[in-house]
Every structure is written in C-alpha cells, then in structure tokens.
Amino acid sequence: MKKFLMLVLIYFISSNFVYGQELAKVGTAGYQFLKVGMDARGAALGDAVSPMIDDSRAVFWNPAMLTKMGDWSVAFTHSGYLADMSMEGFSLGKALPNIGTIALFGTFFNSGDMEETTVAQQNGTGRMFQSQSYSMGVSFARMLTEKFGMGVNIKYVSEDLTNGQLGEDNSTSSWAVDIGSVYYPRFEFAESFRLVMYIRNFGPEIQLAGTHIDFDQGQVLPDPVEFSIFQMPLNFYFGFGYDLWDSDANKITIAGLLEHPNDNEERGNFGLEYMWNNLISLRGGYVLNHDSRSLSGGVGFNLKTFDTFTLKLDYAYVDYGVLDEIQYFTVAIDW
C-alpha cells in the first residue's frame, strides 16, 4: 500500500512539473469568484477536501460527494477575503431514500468600497462604487453502483463591476454546470481508498454590458469600446483520498488533487486531517505551483446536541504571501 501511495504522489508532482512549463493564460476568464470554495474545512486542507467532504458543503467542491451526506445538512460560511473584500456562502441538502440527494446553494461576493480612477484623475475622482457577484444553484447526486457515484450542480451566475453606481450598466449574467464523480475501488489492502474526478464552471462565453475607455500605443481612443468576451473559469480536477488510520478514537486522512484551470498553470493540492474521537479535527494543507498561496491550516469541532443534531464549527487560516492571509469561518448542522 505504501508503494502504491508513493506512485500516486509521484504522478501528481511530476504531472504538475511538466504542465507548469506551459504559458499561463492569466486574465482570460471571468467570474473569478467562482473559483473560491466557500468552506473553512476545504480551505484549511489546501482545497483538497473533495475526497473527504460528507455534508451539504460538497456542492462547493464535488457534487458527487453529496452521496456521503446523512439525512439533512445545512452550512453557512463567511470569509474576510483579500483587500477588504468579503464572501459568504450557504448550502442546504436533503437525502431522499432510493432516489438520491438534492441540495440548494449560493455564494455572494462584495468588493467593499472602491474609488473611481481615470486617466486624467489617477488619484481618484471622489466617486465610490462596489463590485458585487453571486451565484445560486441546485444539485443532485446519486450512487449509480455500490462503487461509483455522480453529482451535478446547475447554477445561475451574476456579476456587476460597478453596481450601477457610476451611471452605466457594467453587469453580466449566465449559467454554469459542475459535474463530479467518485469511485471506490474497494482494494483489499486499502478499503477506504477513493478516486474523484470533476469539472467546475462549464458554461458559455460571457461579456460585460456597457463600454470602457481603451488605448492604442499609449493614446486614448476617441470612442468607448465594448468589453472583450471572456471564458468561464473552467477547472478540471482529479484526485484521491485515503484513511491512513481509522480507529474508534483516532482517524487520519490524506488527500491530493491535480487541478487544471483554463486560465493558469496546473496546481497540486494536498491535505491532511487528524480527527480525535469524532470531536476535534486538526487540518493542514499545501497548494503547489500557486502564484501566492502555499500553506493553510485549521481546526474543527463536532458537537452533538439534542441527540439527533451535530453542530460543526470550522476555522481556516490561509497564507497568501504578499497578499496577506485569509480566514474562513463555517457553521454547519447535520441531522
């Protein structure tokens, strides 16, 4: 088993190294807020939580993992994002016997106040505005066999760069789909080993409404021009999860993901979680080949209440280097 896991890790690292030699297509996709997984547990694990997640928060990672959910699950997440920005997310799931699992979810982004700048007034015009974005959607997941399950998210996406505060409509809206899968090989030597594969944010090309001032060889063009057409921030993931140690009092789980975005270089995401007595969890993660992100960590508490309810409190700290840190807070309830 150790040799098998070592081969998997070597594949992840070598694949990331090879793909990393390609030119990054930064700035070619819009709706960047869709890349953020709204969940403190996942953030602490370096976004490698997909093979581990077992409640309604699976909608933010891999909808196929909704198949591991209990009867009901609800979660709320807040993050004070970079540069005084903020993000919130919620998810609600319900397991339907002999049918599958359904869920609702939403993500909301706010830039905070920003001051307008122009070529003539590069220190600011005094006019303030905010950029706001959100997505809302529905999910369905089902185990198709004892070993293989699939899930899908269908979501409506909206973004407004100026929120109408500068006198012009600079908004756009569209749709996107996430498709995920999970496979349990049931190896005799590694019963808990699982593989995940999923695609996030598959959708049409997008274009902001309104116009902007453009330049040609340093000269301002006489007439405003339309915004360029952008792609959805399409991401493909392939990964694994494995419970290294699973006893009555202790559980250690590792996970790794290879991430292939359409607007950047490949990345490797790795996470490690230790759980004591199904009560307290310590988590750590690392993102390989990211522009600024590297280490992350966090803690989680599972509190039994009224016999049938489990209250989950999760916290994550993510280091973004020169961009400072991000903290996530999640409250979830399973029953």
Image: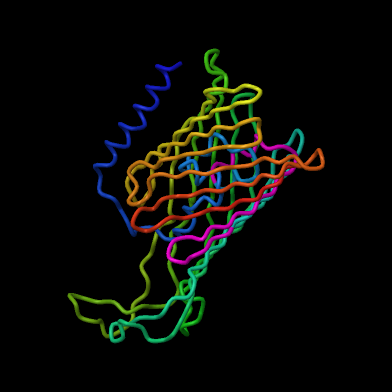
Relative depth, front residue between 224 and 30: 30
Residue that extends furthest to the top in the rendered view of this protein: 188
Residue that extends furthest to the right in the rendered view of this protein: 306
Tell me where residue 52 sits by quadrant: top right
Relative depth, front residue between 92 and 297: 297
**Residue 214 horizontal side relative to residue 315, left or right:** left
Residue at the image position 25 percent from the left and 81 percent from the top: 221
Expressed as whole percent of the image width and height from the top left, the position of residue 284 reads 47, 39
**Residue 291 horizontal side relative to residue 136, left or right:** left
Chain part drawn in magenta: 61-88
Judge whether 9 appears above or below 88 on screen.
Answer: above
Expressed as whole percent of the image width and height from the top left, the position of residue 99 reads 73, 36
Residue at the image position 59 percent from the left and 36 percent from the top: 150
Q: How many marks?
A: 0
**Protein image colouring:** rainbow
Judge whether 31 appears above or below 98 on screen.
Answer: below
Question: Is 86 part of what is drawn in magenta?
Answer: yes
Expressed as whole percent of the image width and height from the top left, the position of residue 156 reads 58, 59
**Residue 256 horizontal side relative to residue 302, left or right:** left
Q: Quadrant of the C terminus?
A: top right
Judge whether 1 appears above or below 321 on screen.
Answer: above
Relative depth, front residue between 65 and 79: 79
Residue at the image position 21 percent from the left and 76 percent from the top: 216
Relative depth, front residue between 260 and 322: 322
Expressed as whole percent of the image width and height from the top left, the position of residue 301 reads 64, 42
Question: Is 333 part of what is drawn in magenta?
Answer: no
Tell me where residue 266 sits by quadrant: top left
